[in-house]
Image: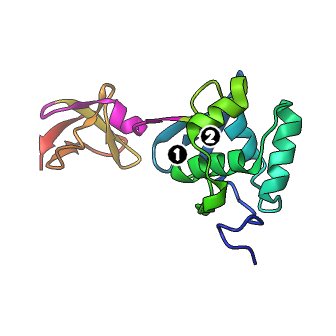
Amino acid sequence: MPTPSSPSALPVARREQLLVVPVADETLVQDLANHQAHCLNPLVASVWEHCDGKTAIRDIAQQVTQEHLTPVDEKMVWLALHELGKIGLLQQRLVRPADQYLSRRDFMRATGALAATALVTSIFVPAAHAQASCGGQGAPCTIASGQPSFSQGTCCTQSPSLICNGTPGGAAGVCQLS
C-alpha cells in the first residue's frame, strides 16, 4: 500500500461539509465545518478535482497538463497537494517527498498565467449566528423551536448569563440575566 509520501500515493479530496462554487476560472470552497472559505486558483482546483483516491500523482499531472495546455509536472502537483492539505481539503494530509519540493516562486515561473493568482486564498467566515448583532439585557426576543431569537439577532451568546425569558412559540419575551 502506498505511503502518504510515496510517488504512487493516491490523494483523496475531502468533499463533506463543503460548498463548492466555480467562479470564472477559480473555484470557491466554503468549509462549513470550520468556517473557512478558500479561493483555489485554476491549477490547484484541477488537482483537487482529480484527487479521487484512484489517480496517482503522475497521472494527475498529465490530466491537468491536458486540461490547461500548460506543462504541469509532479512537483507542481505536490505543491498544490501541500496547499490543499494545509487548508484541510484532503482526507489525509500528504508528506511531500524531498525530491518533489518546488518553491512557490518556481511554481509561478513555470506555470505563468495559469498561476498568476495565489495558489489558495483563505478567509475566516463566521457562523451566521455570530454575524448577527446581539441583544443585550432588556432586548425583545422570542423562542422558536426552543432557541431564543429576536428580529435584530439573539440574546448575546458572548454573555451566557443572558437568557430569553419567554414561552416557546408564545408571545415576545425579554433578554434577562439568568
Residue pictured at 71% horizontal, 59% vertical: 12
In this figure, which colouring scheme has been used for the structure? rainbow
Amino acid beneath label 1: Leu
Q: Single out the residue that lies furthest toward the right.
A: 66
Please determine whether, in this image, residue 43 is positioned above or below residue 48. Answer: above
Badge 2: residue crowd in 10 Å (few <14, some 14–19, many ≥20): few
Query: Percent x, y for residue 90?
Result: 62, 56
Q: Secondary structure at mark 1?
A: loop
The reply to whether the magenta stretch includes residue 59 is: no
The local crowd at label 1, few if under 14, some if 14 to 19, many if 20 or more residues have their Cα within 10 Å, is some
Secondary structure under the numbered disc 2 in the rendered image: strand
Residue 87 tag number? none
Percent position of residue 91, x then y: 62, 61
Which residue is label 2 attached to?
19
Relative image position of residue 124 (x, y in whole percent): 42, 37
Number of residue marks: 2
Observer-nearest residue: 2 or 145? 2
Q: Which residues are magenta?
A: 121-138
Query: Disc 2 marks which amino acid?
Result: Leu
> Rounded to the nearest whole Å, what is the CA distance between mark 2 and mark 1?
7 Å
| For residue 83, side relative to residue 126 (left or right) | right
Asked whether residue 41 is in view, the answer is: no
Q: Which residue is mark 1?
A: 32
Q: Is residue 166 left or right of residue 151?
A: left
Contact, CB < 8 Å: mark 2 with mark 1?
yes
Give the camera-side residue of 86 and 151. Answer: 86
Of label 2 and label 1, which has the lower sequence position? 2
| Residue shown at 60% from the left, 61% from the top | 98
Is residue 131 within the magenta segment? yes
**Residue 73 placement (x, y as % from top left):** 77, 46
